[in-house]
Image (cartoon, helix red, strand yellow):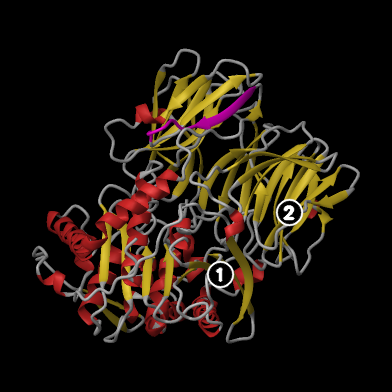
Amino acid sequence: MKHYHIGFLALFCIGCQAKVEKKTHSMNINEAWIDIKTPEVEKVPKEMTIHGDTRIDNYYWLNERENQKVLAYLAAENKYLDTVLSSTKKLQEELFDEMKARIKEDDESVPYFENGYFYYTRFEKGKEYPIYCRKKENLKASEEVMLNVNEMAAGHSYYQVASLDISPDNKLAAFGVDTVSRRKYTLYIKNLETGEILPDQVPETDGSAVWAADNKTIFYSRKNPVTLREERIFKHKLGQPASTDKEVYYEKDETFDVGVHKTKSQKYIVISSGSTLSDEYRILDASQPDGAFKVFQPRQKDMLYAIDHKDDKFYIVTNWDAINFRMMECPLDKTTRDNWKETIPHRPDVLLQSFELFKDYMVISERKNGLTQLRVIDNNKKEHYLDFGEAAYVAYPSVNPEFNTKILRYSYSSMTTPASTYDYDMEAEKKELKKRQEVLGGYNPAEYVTERVYAIARDSVKVPISIVYKKGFEKNGKMPLLLYGYGSYGASMEPSFSSTRLSLLNRGFAYAIAHIRGGEEMGRQWYEDGKMFKKKNTFNDFIDCAEYLLKNNYTSKQHLYAMGGSAGGLLMGAVVNMRPDLWHGVIAAVPFVDVVTTMLDETIPLTTGEFDEWGNPKNKDSYEYMKSYSPYDNVEKKDYPNMLVTTGLHDSQVQYFEPAKWVAKLRELKTDKNVLLMYTNMEAGHGGASGRFKALKDVARQYGFLLFLEGIEK
């Protein structure tokens, strides 16, 4: 199935019981802005006319990333935030310390076995970054450290390793490094026997590499240096300069991105080319790296498919004549659609999400009634489902590289159950808990309650809401509640556990996820009904979920907060324009808020690949529809709630100037005296700070903002 970029999807909420004290703030927070003089910038408005409609952008000048005056302007906003939230400095430190204290610092992942080695990742106490390790043949063997990212990151304010790809002979590792946070990775090759980093360096990649069977050829995708679209697949021979790498595929259609991977069998190298609504794959025998790729099934409009290989067949999951997808199979030498044979039919109430192949089994990941199910089918077509025992949860296949095994490794979590790794014997139908996220400080799941309720939207559709709170939370309309939403790209927001979130729950907050249209929680149609010319369903659903929570006394308007990030930041921007009266406070993280300008600028990363998500504003009807909800275009002279907006200077997904312009326009037009704050991480991008603990500073700031508004000092 397709994998979408979903950006900053949730508060990565990672407790201890805390005494709740409330204090009334009398400070006129807008007055602080007067004392922080913004630097003078040449503020030239930009006039944009299309379809006979003229838009004036008074803050377009903020897009000059290298302009020192613009940088000073962003720094002034940061200073203003620090001034307004100065009374929370100690609280933020306490939040950071308690969130960090819940994390087991000297931690280790569950090892998985692949091609003769057990692989695992571990962390050392006090260190920010992972250490990638392996042991040969058994877990009692001596440890081999492949990469110690703590050592590699020394001297860098940002450092991210994207992938670690091992050669078939286990001697070499390819890995990608980004030191800017623009998601442009340089590939390096390390000799795991000698520790030497080879001279081979390949810039402007997506960070991953695929090895051919000869152990000396890698395939990788290269990004467009301006748009950052992954558009070309190259072949690199070890020992040769990257400048001589041969291009094996160029995707001319700017609405498609490309990637490269291997089938689980390791038999085929696969070039994927996909857009929002169409897929195409090319395959090559991994033992013939200099051969020609063959098209599996030519792309067709509105037809999605994904493939994998087992024995003498390819298996395909597709939406061809099946909106919720079905499974097909075909011979190795006859892969076009006319040769596909159905093996699992389409079901209107079940979304077929993905599949995992084993020698004697197949595991299907399905979604029904908003929850994931794992279905095990053996080679004799005998099948059964795993029983998870909770009403709301998230479960999915984990790392399963081995083909000849009866053990399925899967991950499981709920809003009260920490992340857990299980090994499931598909023959005996028995599970074994291998590891559960250790929450230090005495976390007891019995002290927390989770609910699954349904709001009735204005068009009579039932929208699920997942809720968690600590026992003692009273539904009297006086308790604070944070409502989170996303609703784009078919990304499902799962009811999973977060130990950082305990810092809110322990201070009396409830946390709720609105599973709104635009995601795929309730099937593919749920996504289709929240995109393009139905995008406003996403915003209406979120508002209707808020109204449900208010009506049922979970909270009141004086204590209701909302949060979303990236495309969820668009959601925040839309709902504060539509219903500013509902929220006491809103957090918009890396928000996509200037929809029209961005979708008209095809040099901006992601734009061309998202015409099927938002529409192409070069078409008049699309332009008019997106302009009618674009948050930046719809800011008005009226009261807005308290707001915290965050961004990253090097963000490659949502450019920093979108939230910066939005905040500036809000400052110009809003008529209230509520606080409006913006924080720009000057050293990071879309995902925020790198490292395990730096990111907690961002969460502490967000929580500090909410608790400041709620009058909770501890």
**Furthest-top residue in view?**
194
Q: Is residue 273 depicted above or below 534 in this figure?
A: above
Horizontal placement of 382 versus 107: left or right?
right
Horizontal placement of 496 versus 575: left or right?
right
Q: Is residue 212 shown to the viewer in this render?
A: no
Q: Which residue is mark 1?
A: 518
Marks counted in the figure total 2
Q: Residue 412 in the image: x percent, y percent?
A: 65, 49
Q: Residue at x 21, y 66 (%)?
A: 84
Q: Is residue 109 shown to the viewer in this render?
A: yes
Q: Residue 439 in the image: x percent, y percent?
A: 52, 45
Q: Residue at x 52, y 47 (%)?
A: 442
The three-letter amino acid code for the residue at tag 1 is Gly
Q: Judge the density around disc 1: few (<14), some (14-19), many (≥20) Cα neighbours within 10 Å.
A: many
Determine the secondary structure under disc 2.
loop
The three-letter amino acid code for the residue at tag 2 is Phe
Q: Is residue 537 depicted above or below 67 in this figure?
A: below
Q: Residue 658 in the image: x percent, y percent?
A: 31, 65
In the depicted view, which residue is nearer to us: 685 or 675? Answer: 675
Does the segment drawn in magenta span residue 120?
yes
Does the segment drawn in magenta span residue 1?
no
Q: Residue 250 in the image: x percent, y percent?
A: 49, 45
Q: Along the polypeptide, which appears first: circle 2 or circle 1?
A: 2
Q: Which mark is residue 388?
A: 2
Horizontal placement of 661 versus 500: left or right?
left
> Which is in the foreground here, disc 2 or disc 1?
2
Compute the Cα span from label 2 to label 1: 26 Å
Q: Residue at x 78, y 54 (%)?
A: 338
Magenta residues, start to end: 117-127
Quarter of image, res 202? top left
Q: Is residue 544 depicted above or below 242 in this figure?
A: below
Quarter of image, res 140? top right
